[in-house]
Image (cartoon, helix red, strand yellow):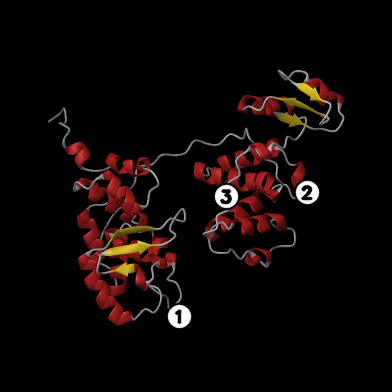
Amino acid sequence: MIGIQFSPDKLIQDLLKGLPQCKWSTKYRMAYVPNSKTNLNRIYSTFKGVAWINYNKFLTNRPINTHNQEVDANWFRTRELPPSYRRCPEPYLQRLELKRYAKNTVKVYVQFFEQFINRYPEKDLETLNESEIREYLKSLINRNCSNSYVNQAINAIKFYYEGVLGMPNRFYELERPRKESHLPKVISKEEVLRIIDHTNNLKHQCIVQLLYSSGLRRSELVSLKLEDIDSKRMIIRIKQAKGKKDRITILSSNVLENLRRYYKEWQPTTYLFEGRNKETYSAVSVLKIVKDAANRAGIRTTVTPHVLRHSFATHLLESGTDLRQIQVLLGHGSTKTTEIYTHVAKHTFTAIKNPLD
């Protein structure tokens, strides 16, 4: 059963009478109805705008991610901000630390939630309702923000009311924009080779070669350690990548030869690619290396590390590699994600007879 406990209120009592099979328990001093998803939704719709319904106990609790590194949110607490700027509430930061979200996720959540609360600087956060949130989201849409941007804003707001204050599904009926669907941008093998040939030095060449030949994300590339390169088995171990998943991908014999030369010349100590003071190499620097080499190679389209990853997957598919194997190499959780490359693979269209030919 679903027990409905409330302070004496004539309006709530009248609304309860409209719930099918609603009865009163003298023993527990509360109304109750059979426990079903239909009744949970019915209770929510009946009392929406009248009372706050806490049915957290009826929802499956998601486990806390214990694999992420401990997040230090002190940087957000000690930032120098204008006196009138409304800071992210301390319980919000504490909850992010407790959930052990990835550092990038923490940064995004804080950024979006502070944008929202600074739109209503004089209002108590707990009094803000769906109308104010919709007004804020509408302003994002009017600024031509992407659907992904708007969805991130919704996630950051819902995290406070549902995750911090414990108001589950308070904004259950917020309309989310449809997820945009874009085909991956792919370049040819010849263009990839031209980019590699136009890198500045051996280190930059190895970076571009690894991004393409192993299908790495740039965050994965800068996190690679020396022991992650297994030259005996010709594989690369990627630890705690996106989604906190480990995986293995392939290592090119040509790239291995360059890596050995690079190791002798640059002598990295911990990470495969290191900055000036042996710290982790900057992901921004990786992006600049790829873009600059592509410009020098005369590639007209914008090339990023992720374009090289897309090209890796597409070229494997075109050469006859099984889709399931490509999924494993890329670290996709579902083949549905990998199937998008069938929409851009050249062999998908070469077998089709053009009606004009």
Please tell me the numbered disc located at residue 104.
Answer: none
Q: In the image, is residue 84 above or below residue 62?
A: below
Q: Secondary structure at mark 2?
A: loop
Q: Secondary structure at mark 3?
A: loop
- Please, what is the three-letter code of the amino acid marked with disc 2? Glu
Q: Is residue 321 visible?
A: yes
* Labels 3, 2: front one: 3
Image quadrant in which you'd find residue 302 = bottom left
- The reply to whether discs 2 and 1 touch (Cβ–Cβ < 8 Å) is no
The residue under the point 75% across, 35% down is 52
Task: Indicate the position of residue 254 as horizontal and vertical percent values.
Answer: 20, 67
Task: Indicate the position of residue 233 as horizontal and vertical percent values.
Answer: 25, 65
Image quadrant in which you'd find residue 293 = bottom left
- Please, what is the three-letter code of the amino acid marked with disc 3? Pro
Task: Tell me if 292 is positioned left or right of 87 in this view.
Answer: left
Tag 2 residue: 122
Mark nearer the N terminus (3 vs 2): 3
- The crowding category of the residue bearing disc 3, from other C-alpha atoms within 10 Å (few below 14, some 14 to 19, many at least 20), is few
Q: State how far apart marks 3 and 2 are (Cα).
A: 35 Å
Tag 1 residue: 277
- The crowding category of the residue bearing disc 2, from other C-alpha atoms within 10 Å (few below 14, some 14 to 19, many at least 20), is few
Q: In the image, is residue 2 above or below residue 289?
A: above
Task: Indicate the position of residue 8 as horizontal and vertical percent values.
Answer: 87, 30
Q: In the image, is residue 298 above or below residue 151?
A: below
Camera-side residue: 137 or 243? Answer: 243
Task: Tell me if 11 is positioned left or right of 226 in this view.
Answer: right
Task: Tell me if 286 is positioned left or right of 58 in this view.
Answer: left
* Labels 3, 1: front one: 3
- The quadrant of the picture occupied by the N terminus is top right
Mark nearer the N terminus (2 vs 1): 2
The residue under the point 49% across, 35% down is 178
